[in-house]
């Protein structure tokens, strides 16, 4: 997969693209992520990317020209990208959307800033995406959240161990089971006996039961949703 990111703050992506699973996936060539500074697509001496809003009001709006110039330049050859715009009021991003996006050969993510982008930019956009009902200072962090969730689903990006963990379980949106490591007792708090038993079948069913219980308690709508889609097995429903 190739992802092109358009932003006025490219530096925000430096660590994200170098570290961890995502950093390894890029350095190994499993995925390609290019971050483009919208300012590089301006033509004036002062490299202006924003302007005051027509009709008045606070703040500035990202101008359409530099973004369109970037889009034209980056789509001159190769497959047309599926274009996302990060927005405070976009469609809510979730695991289902992450799975769908992970199947696209090429994505472009336009990161808004200031009061947002000129409305005409949306003629380039396939999906306006929000990562939640809270207002951030810009669209770069949402872009990183989306890339993290999408790129980990690309075959080969997660190591074997990780991909075992990333089974249908967590990717069905179920909440995770409790994790423990040494010591077996810490300040009077003991690790559940079953996890020390070495009985893998019992451990697996305990973890599944913990995950279903936690999901039912905290996010019952996820269970209802999976039931409706027939994505819970008979024993999970018991
Ligand atoms: N889930 C999300 C996404 C965002 C987001 C995405 C892009 C932009 C571009 C500008 N802002 C700041 C801003 C300005 C005015 C009203 C609201 N938000 C953004 C915020 N916030 N929360």
Image: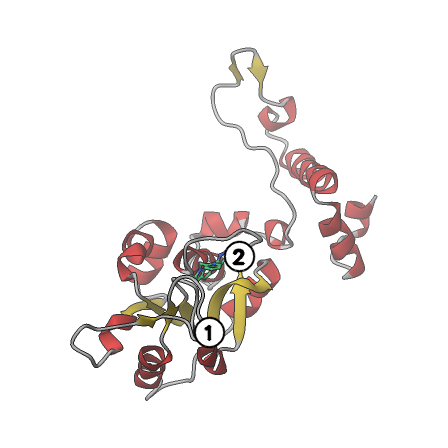
Check the image and report above or below for 47 versus 196.
below
Pointers 1 and 2 in contact (C-beta within 8 Å): no
Q: Residue 157's spot in the image, x, y percent?
A: 42, 59
Q: Residue 202's spot in the image, x, y percent?
A: 68, 34
Q: Is mark 2 within 8 Å of ligand 1?
A: yes
Q: Residues within 10 Å of mark 1 (few under 14, many from 20)?
A: few
Q: Which mark is residue 55?
A: 1
- Left or right: 145 as drawn, with respect to 215: left
Report the number of discs: 2
Report the quarter where the C terminus lies: top right
The structure residue drawn at horizontal position 75% and vertical position 45%, both measured from the top left corner, is 220
Q: For the view shown, which residue lies furthest in the right direction?
A: 238
Residue assigned mark 2: 131
Q: Which residue is nearer to you in this view: 187 or 141?
A: 141
Q: For the view shown, which residue lies furthest in the bottom direction?
A: 76
The structure residue drawn at horizontal position 71% and vertical position 42%, both measured from the top left corner, is 212
- The answer to which quarter of the image holds residue 66 is bottom left
Q: Which mark is residue 182?
A: none
SS type, badge 1:
loop
Q: Residues within 10 Å of mark 2 (few under 14, many from 20)?
A: many
- Estimate the spatial distance between the alpha carbons at disc 1 and disc 2, rounded to whole Å: 29 Å
SS type, badge 2:
loop
- Left or right: 12 as drawn, with respect to 160: left
Looking at marks 1 and 2 on the same chain, the residue that comes earlier in the sequence is marked by 1
Q: Which residue is nearer to you in this view: 131 or 213?
A: 131
Report the quarter where the N terminus lies: bottom left
Check the image and report above or below for 4 versus 165.
below
Q: Which residue is nearer to you in this view: 37 or 96?
A: 37
Q: Residue 44's spot in the image, x, y percent?
A: 20, 79
């Amino acid at each position: 997969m190739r992802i092109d990111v358009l932003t006025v703050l490219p530096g925000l992506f430096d660590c994200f693209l170098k570290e961890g699973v995502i950093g390894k996936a890029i350095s190994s060539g499993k995925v390609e992520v290019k971050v483009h500074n919208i300012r590089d697509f301006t033509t004036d001496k002062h490299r202006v990317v924003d302007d005051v809003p027509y009709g008045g009001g606070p703040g500035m709006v990202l101008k359409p020209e530099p973004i369109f110039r970037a889009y034209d330049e980056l789509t001159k050859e190769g497959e047309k990208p599926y274009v996302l715009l990060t927005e405070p009021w976009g469609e809510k991003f979730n695991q289902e959307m992450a799975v769908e996006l992970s199947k696209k050969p090429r994505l472009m993510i336009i990161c808004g800033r200031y009061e947002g982008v000129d409305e005409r930019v949306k003629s380039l956009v396939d999906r306006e995406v929000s990562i939640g009902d809270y207002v951030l200072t810009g669209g770069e962090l949402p872009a990183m959240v989306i890339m993290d969730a999408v790129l980990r689903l690309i075959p080969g990006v997660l190591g074997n161990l990780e991909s075992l963990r990333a089974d249908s379980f967590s990717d069905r949106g179920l909440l995770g089971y409790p994790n423990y490591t040494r010591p077996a007792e810490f300040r009077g708090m003991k690790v559940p006996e079953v996890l020390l038993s070495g009985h893998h079948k019992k451990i697996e069913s305990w973890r599944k039961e913990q995950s279903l219980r936690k999901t039912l308690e905290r996010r019952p709508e996820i269970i209802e949703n999976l039931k409706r889609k027939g994505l819970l097995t008979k024993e999970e429903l018991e």
